[in-house]
Amino acid sequence: MRCPYCGQVNTDATRYCLRCGRAIGTVQQPPLSTRPQIAPAVPPAPTGSRPGMRGQPVRLPGSGIVEATAQPAATAPPGEPVAAPGPPAGFPPKTLAQLQELATAALAYAVGSSKLEVGNKKIVDIIYPSCPAWQQVATLYKALSEQDEERYDSVVIRGFREESDLSLAFNNGRLTFDRRARLGGQLIRRYLIETHRGFEVDSLRIVLTEEWPAEQLRA
């Protein structure tokens, strides 16, 4: 055993140093459990104050990933209605193809009543929310495409706002389809569309026609 004071080498059984005489047999190292512990260096955890790239996930303390919002959705100030979407290009429609394309933006509707009138005419009343003129036209044509039958000479789709009295005149647009209208000596199909009640200043009146296919005329 080496003396911790003077460096003299002594036997393991020696309790006092042979050189300096100091007690060395009772010197013991403190147990491991009483030694001071030094905590390892840990990098600071990231916080939400330093977001990552826009639109990419930002990892915050704890489990899971919180998605960073790229841009908040635009909303109207409290108390103000949200502006209705503007009409698409090609409105009002000037061809049947434009009318058919417009119908892809039609609103959902419910059939309020359906009846037959003199002259082989079918009248269908539909109910759907108030909306701009272009959505009225789109919804009316969608209803015609779903309610029409070849056996009727005319089909009238009358639009009503929700909670309207169906015994009154239409207030959410009307579409009148004549399957066998005549223009001079020519047989045509005619679509007459009116928006709103038909007489307001901003109401629209759209008339579209298409010729009968030659094979059907021969038949």
Image (cartoon, grey):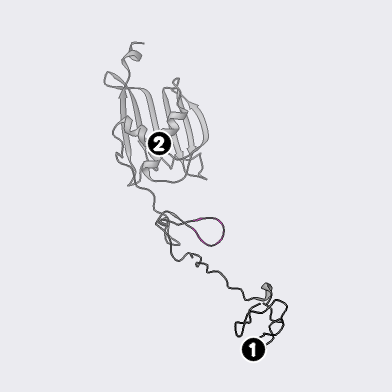
Mark number displayed over residue 104: 2
Number of numbered labels in the structure image: 2
Residue closer to the observer: 143 or 77: 77
Residue 215: x %, y % from top left: 33, 13
What residue is rendered at 69% in x and 77% in y? 11
The N terminus, quarter of image: bottom right
What residue is rendered at 41% in x and 22% in y? 153
* Residues packed near mark 1 inside 10 Å, few (<14), some (14 to 19) or many (20 plus): few
* Residues packed near mark 2 inside 10 Å, few (<14), some (14 to 19) or many (20 plus): few
In screen coordinates, is 137 left or right of 48? left
Q: Earlier in the sequence, mark 2 or mark 1?
A: 1
Q: Which residue is mark 1?
A: 20
Residue closer to the observer: 2 or 105: 2
What residue is rendered at 44% in x and 36% in y? 158
Q: Secondary structure at mark 1?
A: loop
Q: Secondary structure at mark 2?
A: helix
Based on the displayed image, in which of its 4 quarters is residue 16 positioned? bottom right
Residue closer to the observer: 140 or 11: 11
Residue 103: x %, y % from top left: 39, 35
Magenta span contains residue 126: no
Query: Looking at the magenta stretch, what is its main secondary structure?
Result: loop
- Magenta extent: 59-66
